[in-house]
Image: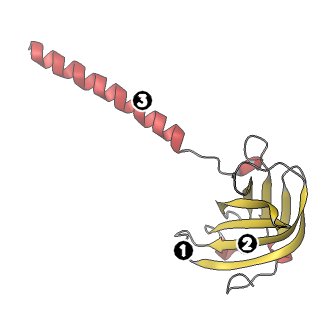
Amino acid sequence: MKNLFKVLEAMRSIAIIALIAVIGFSFAACGDDGGGGGGGGSGTFTLTSIPSPYNGCKVTFSGQKNFSNDLYGRATVISNRSASIPVLIGGSLTPYSGSDTMVTLRFNIIDLSETTALYGKYTNNVVFSNGSAALSFNDITWDAAGYP
């Protein structure tokens, strides 16, 4: 009987530890989804008017200004025909909060397996203010074959 109580006490301790681990891992697994401009003052690139067949796909971009100040948009799921893409500084991949005009932006819309590019193209002279900018899907020249 004494051994039974020890086993039950050990099982209870293991269950408590497992519960704490599950809660801890669930917090660690939840990332910033890019909504509301992201955390820590990071900018957001908003792409709107995306055709509804692309809902559920991901969109990302890269931007270049005279071979410096490269920006990257973290892959974000398209929902309700738009996407708010967190903007990161190239190289360090830290959140971007500056104001610049990007000479070139290149976009990719990819399927959820992240292997097949559906569309990719660029637009010129996109102005970022406080790390953020926006364009409509219709403002961008798209090409099913990829980058020009």
Quadrant the C terminus occupies: bottom right
Helix or strand or loop: what does disc 1 sit on? loop
- Left or right: 118 as drawn, with respect to 1: right
Residue 22: image quadrant is top left
- The N terminus lies in quadrant: top left
> Going from the N terminus, do you reach mark 1 or mark 2 first?
2
> Mark 3: few, some, or many residues within 10 Å (few <14, many ≥20)?
few
Question: Which quadrant of the view contains residue 5?
Answer: top left
Residue depth check, mark 3 versus mark 1: number of the one nearer the observer:
1
Of residues 21 and 50, the one drawn nearer to the viewer in this rendering = 21
The residue carrying mark 1 is 115
Horizontally, residue 15 falls left or right of residue 130, namely left
Viewer-nearest residue: 39 or 80: 39
Q: Amino acid at mark 2?
A: Phe
Identify the residue position indicated by label 3 in the image: 20
The label on residue 107 is 2
101 displayed left or right of 146: right
What is the three-letter code of the residue carrying label 1?
Answer: Thr
Give the distance between the C-alpha atoms of the residues marked 3 and 1, in whole angstroms: 36 Å
Note whether residue 128 is visible. no
The image position of residue 34, as x and y in percent, is: 70, 51
Secondary structure beneath dot 2 equals: strand
Residue 87 image-quadrant placement: bottom right
Kindly identify the residue that appears in the image at 88 percent across and 49 percent down. 130
Asked if labels 1 and 3 touch by Cβ distance under 8 angstroms, the answer is: no
Mark before the other along the chain sequence, 2 or 3: 3
Q: CA distance from mark 2 to mark 3?
A: 41 Å
50 or 135: which is nearer to us? 135
